[in-house]
C-alpha cells in the first residue's frame, strides 16, 4: 500500500441489479473499504458510455470502475456482453487520449458478492493512489483559461 | 431550466447513519448547495413524521424536487416516492442518496464518511433539477401462475394458489412429483409417516381442475416481465401415451430389462426400463427410460413384452419431446436441493466400503416400501449390531460447504429412533459437532433420544476404515474419532455407518437461475431479494422462491415459505394491471438516421425499424430499460427516461464537485 497522502477520487458505475445490490450487501455485512468511490446507479452496465467515463475524468476523477452482473446473469439477457465488448474499445480510446492503463476497471460483481465489491474498491483505490492524481480537470481549466480567460474566472 | 426548489432530508437512521456521519454538518452544508430551498435532518425519515416533513414542505414551502439521504433505494425508495406523490409531487422528482449501505456502514473514519456522504448527496442535488416527471407504465397482468419443482414446496404453493381460483401449471423434472419428502418413512420430530401427510396432497394436486401438471418436463426459456411472462416448457417423451395409460404397472412387470438401479431407491433397489418410480406416483403413469429400453437404445427388443402387456396400447416408441408455450403472470421456483455428494469425503469410504451409506439411502432402507421392505439390514442381509451416524458430512466444513444444512442433526436423531425402534439391542452412536435442535419440539425430541439410550459422542470422525486392530473389529467397519468431551481418541466398531450429508444447491441451480433471470447466493442457493424482509421474492419482479432452493430447511419452514410465496404471487396476479418502471428508452424519429445499430443490439427485440419514417422505434411494452441502445447510438438519439445522459452527467459533476 503506497501511502503518498493522495486520496484518489473515484466514480463507480454500478448496475442496479447485481453490483449496486452487491455494494448494498457489503454495507449490510458492515464490511469496511476506503471511502474514495462514489457510486452512480444505472439500470445496466450496458448503459455506460465512453462519454460518461470521459466526463468523470474531465471533472476530476482519478479512476473509474464499471461494475455489472457476471456473464450469463444479466437482467437484460446480454447487456453486460455489450459492456464487455465495448470495454476494450473504450480502453483503446482512452489510451489514445493519453490516459495511463489501469485508471478504468471493469468488474463483475453479483448481488451476493458484497465481499468482492469491498475488495475491488479497496484494491482499486490503492492502485490509483499509486498511479497518482490524473489532473485532467486542472489541465482543462488551464487550457480553457488560455482560450477564454474571462469564462474561467467568471 | 426553471428555478427549482429542492428539499433535502437527511436521515440519522438511529445511529446507523448518525453514529458515523456528522448529519448536522451535512445538513448545514446541504442548505448552501445550488437550488436547495430547505435541508432537514430527522432521526428516522421512514417514520410517519419523517415522511410528513416532505409532504409539508411540498405544500407549505412549495418545494419542487426532493432528495432523501438515507438507506438504499432498494429499501425505501418506494416509501419516499409514495410520500412525495401523496404530497402532490410527481414521485420521479424524488431521488435517494444512499448514505447508509454505501457510506456509514462501510467507512471506518467518521470524517471520511461525512465527506463521502456529501459527495453522494451532491450527485443527487445536481441531478434533481434535470429530473422529469414520469408516470409508471401500467401493464395488464396474466392471472395464471407457473410453479417450477414439485417437491413439498411446489405442491403446497400450487394447492394454495389453486384454492384462490388461480390457474397453476406445475412443471416437475422427474416422472412424478413428491421430491425428497416422498422418499422418507417418517418425519421428525413428530414421527408422522411422510407418505400419510404427503400422498393426499399429491393426489389432490393431480386431480385439481385448476392445476395443470407437467411432470417429466423442464422449462427451457423464459421471456417477459412481471405479469407477462412467456415460458417454453419441454415435455420429455415418455414413450407412453399418458392419456390412455392407466398406471396399472403391468408393463414394468413384463419388461425384460429389470435390473436398472432405481433413482427413487437411491440405487439400492431396481426398476425396469419402463417404470413407475413409486407406487404413489403422481401422475401415476409409466415412463420408458430411453437409455435402458432395448427398443429405443439398440433398436432390438424381440419380444416387446411391454407392448403386449399393455391393455390400452399406450406404448408409443415414436413419441417425441414436445415444446409447450405458456403465458403466466408470476412464477414460483421450488426446485429444492440435492444431497451433498459424500464420495468427495474419501476418508469416510463412501462408494469404497460396504455398509457406509448416505442418509437418503438410510431413508429408503428404513422405509416399509423401500428395497428392504423396511428391514434395517446391512448388505449381507443381517441386522447391524452397531450403527454410527456421522453428522456434518460436507456441511460446516471449510473444505466443502461452510454453512450448516440445518436438518441433519434432526434427521440423524430420527434415524437413531428408527433403529432403536426396529432393533432395540443395537448400539447407536451419533458423532456430532454441536446438536442443533432449533425448531418447535426439536430439543424435546433430542432429550427423548438420550433417554432411548443413544450414545452421543461429541467429535468429528477422522476416518472410517475396515482395518481391524482387535478381534472385535474383525470384518467390521471402524470409525476413528476424537471424543472431545472425554478428551480421548476412540475407535468405534460398526456394522453400518450413516453419513448425514448436507444439503447442496441443485447441480444446475446456476443455469436454471439464469434461464429465469435472477441470481444465486455465494453458496449456490437462489438469492432472495432481501434476507429478512423479502425472503421469498427475487430481484426479478414476479418471480418468487420457496423451499430448499433458497436454503436448506425443514418441512415446516418449507411449507411456510410456500405459503408466503403463494401470497406474494396472489398479491400480484389477483390484479388486472401492474405498474412497471417508466425508465425505458425513446427515439426521436427526426434525429434518427435509420442506421439500425440499436435494432440489432436490443436484448429484448424492443426496437423495430420503421421504413416509412426511416427511423428506429421503441416498442414500449417490450422495452425493459437497460439503456444499451442509448449507449450504442453514434448520434445519441435514443434516450432513456430517468437515466438521460444529462442526468448521468449531472450526477458525475455533483459527485466530484465536493
Ligand atoms: C435425509 C433427509 C431427511 C430429512 N428428513 C426430514 C424430516 O424428517 N422432517 C423435515 O421436516 N425435513 C426433513 N428433511 C428436509 C426435507 O427434505 C426438505 O425440507 C424438503 O424436502 C424440501 O422440499 P422442497 O420442495 O423445497 O425440495 P425437494 O424435496 O428437493 O423438491 C424439489 C423438486 O423440484 C424438482 N426440480 C428440481 N429442479 C427442477 C427443475 N429445474 N425443473 C423442474 N423441477 C425441478 C425436483 O425433481 C423435486 O421434485 C430431510 C432431508 C434429508 C436430506
Image (tube, coloured by chain):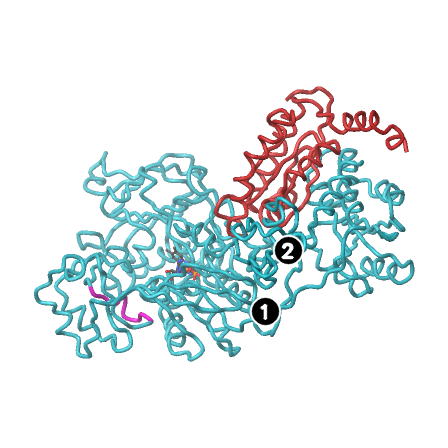
The C terminus of chain A: image quadrant: top right
Rendered position, B337 above or below A87 = below
Q: Write the start and end of the magenta stretch as one range.
A: B274-282
Question: Can you tell me whether the CB of the residue at mark 2 lies under 8 Å from the nearest atom of ligand 1?
Answer: no
Work out how far the residue at label 1 is from the one at label 2, CA to CA, in angstroms. Answer: 25 Å
Give residue B585's mark: 2
Q: Nearer the viewer, mark 1 or mark 2?
A: 2
Kindly report the secondary structure that dominates the magenta region of the rendered protein.
loop
| Quarter holding residue B612 | bottom right
In the image, taking residue B510 as reference, residue B83 lies left or right, namely: right
Rendered position, B30 above or below A6 = below
Looking at marks 1 and 2 on the same chain, the residue that comes earlier in the sequence is marked by 1
What is the x, y in percent for residue B92? 74, 58
In the image, taking residue B396 as reference, residue B102 lies left or right, namely: right
The N terminus of chain A: image quadrant: top right
Give residue B572's mark: 1
Q: Label the cyan chain with its letter.
A: B
Q: Is residue B368 visible?
A: no
Amino acid at each position: 500500500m503506497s501511502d503518498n497522502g493522495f486520496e484518489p477520487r473515484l466514480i463507480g458505475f454500478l448496475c442496479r441489479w447485481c453490483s449496486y445490490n452487491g455494494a448494498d450487501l457489503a454495507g449490510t455485512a458492515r464490511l469496511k473499504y476506503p471511502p474514495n468511490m462514489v457510486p452512480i446507479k444505472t439500470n445496466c452496465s450496458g448503459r455506460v458510455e465512453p462519454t460518461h467515463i470521459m466526463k468523470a475524468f474531465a471533472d476530476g476523477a482519478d479512476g473509474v470502475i464499471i461494475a455489472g452482473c457476471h456473464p450469463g446473469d444479466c437482467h437484460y439477457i446480454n447487456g453486460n456482453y455489450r459492456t464487455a465488448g465495448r470495454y476494450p474499445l473504450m480502453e483503446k480510446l482512452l489510451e489514445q487520449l493519453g490516459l495511463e492503463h489501469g485508471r478504468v476497471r471493469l468488474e463483475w460483481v453479483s448481488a451476493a458478492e458484497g465481499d468482492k465489491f469491498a475488495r475491488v474498491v479497496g484494491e482499486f483505490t490503492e492502485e490509483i493512489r499509486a498511479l497518482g492524481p490524473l489532473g485532467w480537470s486542472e489541465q482543462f481549466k488551464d487550457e480553457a483559461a488560455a482560450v477564454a480567460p474571462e469564462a474561467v474566472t467568471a | 431550466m426553471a428555478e427549482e426548489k429542492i428539499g433535502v432530508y437527511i436521515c440519522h437512521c438511529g445511529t446507523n447513519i448518525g453514529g458515523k456521519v456528522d448529519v448536522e454538518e451535512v445538513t448545514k452544508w446541504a442548505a448552501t448547495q445550488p437550488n436547495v430551498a430547505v435541508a432537514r435532518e430527522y432521526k428516522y425519515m421512514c417514520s410517519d413524521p419523517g415522511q410528513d416533513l416532505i409532504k409539508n414542505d411540498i405544500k407549505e414551502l412549495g418545494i419542487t424536487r426532493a432528495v432523501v439521504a438515507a438507506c438504499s433505494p432498494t429499501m425505501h425508495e418506494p416509501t419516499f416516492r409514495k410520500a412525495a406523490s401523496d404530497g402532490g409531487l410527481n414521485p420521479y422528482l424524488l431521488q435517494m442518496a444512499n448514505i447508509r449501505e454505501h457510506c456509514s456502514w462501510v467507512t471506518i473514519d467518521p470524517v471520511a464518511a461525512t465527506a463521502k456522504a456529501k459527495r453522494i448527496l451532491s450527485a443527487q442535488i445536481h441531478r434533481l433539477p434535470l429530473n422529469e416527471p414520469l408516470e409508471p407504465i401500467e401493464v395488464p397482468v396474466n392471472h395464471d401462475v407457473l410453479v417450477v419443482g414439485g417437491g413439498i414446496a411446489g405442491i403446497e404453493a400450487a394447492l394454495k394458489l389453486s384454492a384462490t381460483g388461480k390457474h397453476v401449471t406445475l412443471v416437475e423434472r422427474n416422472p412424478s412429483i413428491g421430491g425428497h419428502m416422498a422418499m422418507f418413512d417418517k418425519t421428525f420430530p413428530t414421527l408422522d409417516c411422510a407418505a400419510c401427510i404427503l400422498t393426499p396432497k399429491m393426489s389432490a394436486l393431480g386431480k385439481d381442475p385448476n392445476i395443470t401438471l407437467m411432470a417429466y418436463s423442464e422449462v427451457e426459456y423464459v421471456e417477459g416481465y412481471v405479469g407477462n411472462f412467456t415460458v417454453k416448457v419441454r415435455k420429455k417423451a415418455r414413450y407412453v401415451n399418458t392419456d390412455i395409460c392407466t398406471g396399472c404397472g403391468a408393463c414394468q412387470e413384463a419388461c425384460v430389462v429389470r435390473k436398472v438401479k432405481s433413482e427413487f431407491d437411491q440405487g439400492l433397489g431396481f426398476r425396469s426400463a419402463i417404470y413407475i418410480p413409486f407406487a404413489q406416483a403422481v401422475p401415476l403413469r409409466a415412463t420408458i427410460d430411453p437409455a435402458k429400453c432395448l427398443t429405443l437404445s439398440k433398436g432390438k427388443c424381440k419380444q416387446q413384452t411391454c407392448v403386449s402387456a399393455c391393455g390400452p396400447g399406450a406404448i408409443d416408441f415414436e413419441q417425441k419431446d414436445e415444446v409447450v408455450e405458456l403465458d403466466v403472470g408470476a412464477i414460483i421456483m421450488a426446485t429444492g436441493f440435492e444431497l451433498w455428494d459424500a464420495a468427495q469425503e474419501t476418508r469416510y469410504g463412501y462408494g469404497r466400503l460396504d455398509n457406509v451409506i448416505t442418509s437418503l439411502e438410510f431413508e429408503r432402507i428404513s422405509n416399509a416400501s423401500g428395497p428392504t421392505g423396511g428391514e434395517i439390514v446391512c448388505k449381507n442381509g443381517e441386522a447391524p449390531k452397531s450403527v454410527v451416524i456421522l453428522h456434518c458430512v460436507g456441511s460446516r466444513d471449510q473444505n466443502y460447504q461452510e454453512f450448516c444444512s440445518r436438518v441433519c442433526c434432526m434427521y440423524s436423531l430420527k434415524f437413531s429412533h428408527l433403529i432403536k425402534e426396529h432393533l432395540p439391542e443395537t448400539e447407536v452412536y451419533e458423532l456430532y459437532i454441536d446438536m442443533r435442535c432449533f425448531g418447535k419440539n426439536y430439543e424435546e425430541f433430542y432429550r427423548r433420544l438420550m433417554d432411548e439410550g443413544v450414545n452421543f459422542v461429541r467429535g468429528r470422525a477422522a476416518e472410517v476404515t475396515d482395518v481391524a486392530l482387535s478381534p472385535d473389529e474383525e470384518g467390521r467397519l471402524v470409525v476413528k474419532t476424537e471424543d472431545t468431551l472425554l478428551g480421548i481418541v476412540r475407535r468405534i466398531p460398526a456394522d453400518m455407518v450413516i453419513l448425514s450429508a448436507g444439503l447442496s444447491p441443485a447441480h444446475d441451480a446456476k443455469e436454471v437461475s439464469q434461464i429465469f433471470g435472477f441470481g444465486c447466493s455465494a453458496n449456490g442457493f437462489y438469492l432472495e431479494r432481501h434476507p429478512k424482509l423479502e425472503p421469498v421474492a427475487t430481484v426479478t419482479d414476479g418471480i418468487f422462491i420457496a423451499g430448499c432452493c433458497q436454503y436448506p430447511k425443514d418441512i415446516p419452514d418449507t411449507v411456510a415459505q410456500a405459503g408466503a410465496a403463494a401470497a406474494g404471487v396472489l398479491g400480484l396476479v389477483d390484479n388486472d394491471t401492474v405498474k412497471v418502471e417508466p425508465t425505458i428508452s425513446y427515439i426521436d424519429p427526426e434525429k434518427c438516421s435509420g442506421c439500425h445499430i440499436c435494432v440489432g443490439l436490443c436484448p429484448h427485440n424492443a426496437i423495430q425499424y420503421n421504413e416509412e419514417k426511416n427511423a428506429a422505434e421503441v416498442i414500449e411494452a417490450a422495452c425493459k430499460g437497460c439503456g444499451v441502445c442509448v449507449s450504442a447510438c453514434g448520434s445519441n438519439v435514443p434516450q432513456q427516461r430517468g437515466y438521460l445522459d444529462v442526468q448521468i452527467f449531472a450526477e458525475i459533476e455533483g459527485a466530484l464537485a465536493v
